[in-house]
Each structure stands twice: as C-alpha cells, then as structure tokens.
Amino acid sequence: MRNKILCYPSKVSFPSISITGEDCNFSCIHCNRKYLKFMMHVPQENLYEKAIELENRGTKGILVSGGLDKSGRVPIDYSILRKIKIDTKLMINLHSGLLRREDAKEIKNSKIDVVSVDFVGSNDTIKNILKVPFKVSDYEDTVRFLIEEEVNVVPHICVGLDKGKVIGEYNAVEILKRYPIKSLTLLVLIKNELEKTGSIIYDIQSIKDFFTYTRNSFPGAKISLGCMRPRIKELDEIALIFDNIVNPTKNMIKLIRNEGNVTVKEICCSLC
C-alpha cells in the first residue's frame, strides 16, 4: 500500500492569494466570487514584496489565483512568478484558468512548481453552471499545452458540479486518460451559492463510484482528495483510495492509520 499523505495547508504555511481581489469577469453560480473573498488580496504589482514578507514569516509556499479575465485566464504576469522563484525558496502553485500555448511557454520559463487546472467534462455544465463562453475542448487544450511544454500540471475535477449531479465527470476522466497525468485532484461540490437556486441532494453512491472509477483509471497517478468539499460522513470510508487528503476528518485519519504509513505536510495537495 502506498504511503498516505495528510495535507494541512494554512494561511500561515501555504496561503491562497488572489491577485484580482474579489473581481472576476464571470459569475459562476456555484461560486459567485465567494471563494475570492476569503483569499489574501495582493495586487500583482505587490506580489513580489508580499512573497518576500511571507517567506520571512516562515511560509512554505503560496497558491496564486484570482478572478478570470474575458479569455478565462487568471491575468498574472508570469515574470513576477519567475522573480519570486529566483529570489525565494517558496513553492508556487498557480491556479491558472484557461491558457494559450504562449501562456504555457511562459509558465515553463517561470520555473514555478505546479499549475492547478479546473477540468470540466460537460459543455452543458460549462454553459449553465459556470456561465462562461468556453467549451470542454478549451479545458483540454489548457492541459495539453502545459503537458507538451513539460509543465507540472494537476487537473482538478469537481464531482457534482452540475447541481450535485454526476454529468460530465466521467467524460473528463476519459479525456484526461489520453495524457500522461501524474497527479489528479478530486473535489466535491460545496452547496453554498447553488443552494439558493434549489435544494441540492448529494448522491453519495454516485460520488463513491466516480472516485473508485478515477482511481482505477489512473493506477500509477497520485490521486488527491482536495480541500474544496463538504464534510460528508458517508464519504469517510472512501479515504483509503486516495494518496493525499487535505484536512481529513478524524474518522478518515483513523481509517488511514490502521492501514499503513502516514506522512503529515503543511502544504497544498498539488505539491505533496
């Protein structure tokens, strides 16, 4: 059995930074800019200085994110990330949004540690939930560009994104199986904003089935259970299929420790 890693990123050890504050060109109904609100707001012209400050405080790394521009990209100047990598020992996880080939090349040159990419497998979900003018092919292109430029990329699939229903998730896996995916993170819809549009009921068995299918589809990859998920007791038992778990429940920890070796890290699961 593989060694299990329990990840506990915090605002001290691995803060999430939005370079756009709460601004985003889109209003996805599952988010509606809510997640940006709780990030550290640092305009990118101040990002380098903030990185130096954070390292001096003992920070291990940073997640650089933000709202999307009209092209679906987080509008970061990659040269700033390159400068941070040169002058600090901070790990950098970039939540990039959708990318062009040129972006992937610049990211490669920046020498950052990893890029996290949301991956959606249904055009209907993109249209009706994310409400953005993009297609599944745009998400695939982003992953393909990064892989072809030899950038460490970790796709993230949110299970139940379409009002709790499992719709495009299996297609997302089938698409990603075309590529040499080394790490993959699974999330579960948090009701928040979507609850305002009607009751959201989780199909626990469908979520478990998808988790298991994904694990079997990528036997050699590192599969993580990410931080963006509701704490549902019925899902605790599925913990054993994951290599990394962010902020596990007490019951998950008990199950994992009964099965073998455990390592604890205070960093983002994309870098474990």
Image (cartoon, rainbow, N blue to C red):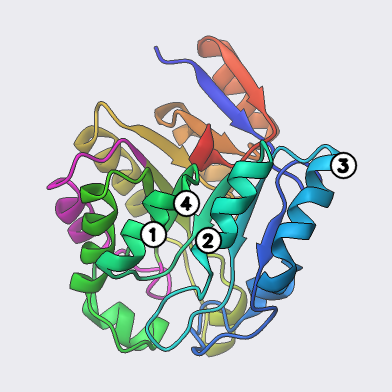
Q: Which residue is at a point 42% across and 89% down the rendered structure image?
A: 70
Q: Which residue is at a point 60% across and 52% down the rendered structure image?
A: 83
Q: Badge 1 local density, few (<14 within 10 Å), some, or many (20+)?
A: some
The answer to the question of whether label 4 and label 1 lie on touching residues, with beta carbons closer than 8 A, is yes
Q: In this figure, which residue is indicated by the disc labeled 3?
A: 57
Q: Which mark is residue 110?
A: 4
Mark nearest the camera among 3 and 1 is 1
In x, y percent, where is residue 103?
35, 65
> Which SS type dominates the magenta stretch?
loop
Q: Quadrant of residue 222?
A: top left
Q: In this figure, which residue is indicated by the disc labeled 1?
A: 106
Label 3 to label 4, Cα distance in Å? 23 Å
Segment tinted magenta in the rendering: 161-183
Label 2 to label 4, Cα distance in Å? 6 Å
In x, y percent, where is residue 144?
21, 56
Type of the residue with mark 1 = Glu
Q: In this figure, which residue is indicated by the disc labeled 2?
A: 79
In this orientation, which residue lies closer to the viewer: 243 or 73? Answer: 73
Type of the residue with mark 2 = Ser
The answer to the question of whether label 1 and label 2 lie on touching residues, with beta carbons closer than 8 A, is yes
Q: Label 2's element?
A: helix
- Tell whether position 178 is magenta: yes
In x, y percent, where is residue 23?
63, 86
